[in-house]
Image (cartoon, rainbow, N blue to C red):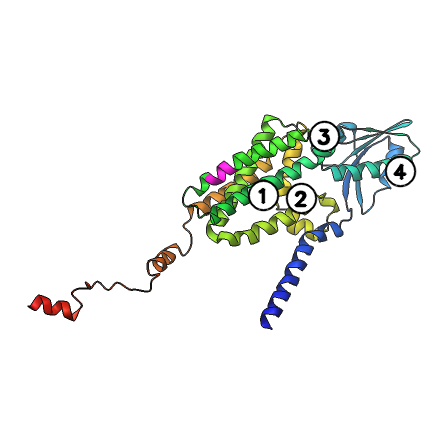
Amino acid sequence: MRTVLITAVAGAGVAFLLGLLTFGVQATVHPHDVPLAVVAPPPMAERVARADSAEIDIRVVSADEARNLLRDKEVYGVLEIAPGQATIRLNPAVNPSGTQVAQQVLTGVAQGAGLPVEVEAVTPTAAERTAPLAASALLWVGGMIAGLLFVVLKGGRLRWLSAVTAAVLVTGSTAGLLAWWGVTFSAQALAFLLAVAVSFALLQAGLFKHLGVRAMGVLGVLYLMAPAVAGQVPELLNPVYRAVLWSWTPFRFSAEGLRSLMYGGSVGTEWWVFGGVALIGLVLLAVKKAGLAGEKAQADRADGIVDVGVHQADGLPGAERQHTA
């Protein structure tokens, strides 16, 4: 009866935790302080500014400042109002969910002013919108499976070499798959993909070294929850999810970095993030596994016999009589 109760409670607890960390992210989505920029003459600017609310944060700026904000991904969209015309400018390097929200809101603002709307933006294909997060997830899964098989097949040394080799091959297979979908990358984007794959694989290899198959309990949960968070616009997330999950998940940095590089942008913070992840993995691989000496001693005494240093023949009475004779 005790086993029945324990297993039932464990199953319910795991289901609750996974629901909280995955589906809960999407179920609590609601916009708040979504940053947008508007360029308009003074009378119209004052009218637009009054449209500000808890859901959106409208900044009335100059045309040059608006373009800089959009280029630096500090706003999700720009509305430029001229006599008799309104133009919405979007950046494809920004999270597509964010640009969708920006387009809807700015279209409503322009229509409220009685102006026709023109959208000026590069429209990513479905594959291009999917590629950054999909690539991140595939790189994680590839390294995770390689690390798991290394444990199951009882691999010995050169665990780091297995991780790096897997990272190179997974990067190639992921890039090939995305190319088949019609998504092409620059050399810098491919280098970034490889860096992400290597950092993921080294971290996973380090965890598998110290935890064995039990590392799947950590890596599997990260895989389930991270994409659900990383694919969301931070201004749409519940503040708790944004602070506790979105702020640190490496999937977010890999997806955002790859999206920027796909459209001619640059990355900076992302290189430091994945350099740090790789360093943690190398440290875990370099540190001797806890309890290794004890495990070796246990293996030497597996048959339960303790060697006390007495020769078998010398310890037997019969042998003693033979020597005396």
**Which range of residues does the magenta coloring cover?**
162-166
In the image, residue 299 above or below residue 91: below
Instruction: Say if residue 129 shows up in the picture.
Output: yes
Q: Mark 3 highlights which residue?
A: 68
Tell me how far mark 1 sits from mark 4, CA to CA: 50 Å
Q: For residue 134, what is the image quadrant?
A: top right
Circles 3 and 4 in contact, beta carbons < 8 Å: no
Q: Helix, strand, or loop for circle 4?
A: helix
Amino acid found under the numbered disc labelled 1: Val
Marks 1 and 2, Cα distance to the nearest angstrom? 16 Å
Distance in Å between CA atoms under marks 3 and 2:
25 Å
Residue 251 drawn above or below residue 86:
below
Q: Which residue is mark 1?
A: 141
Where's residue 187, x and y in %? 59, 26
Rendered residue at 45%/43% (across/down): 159
Determine the CA span between mark 3 and mark 1.
37 Å
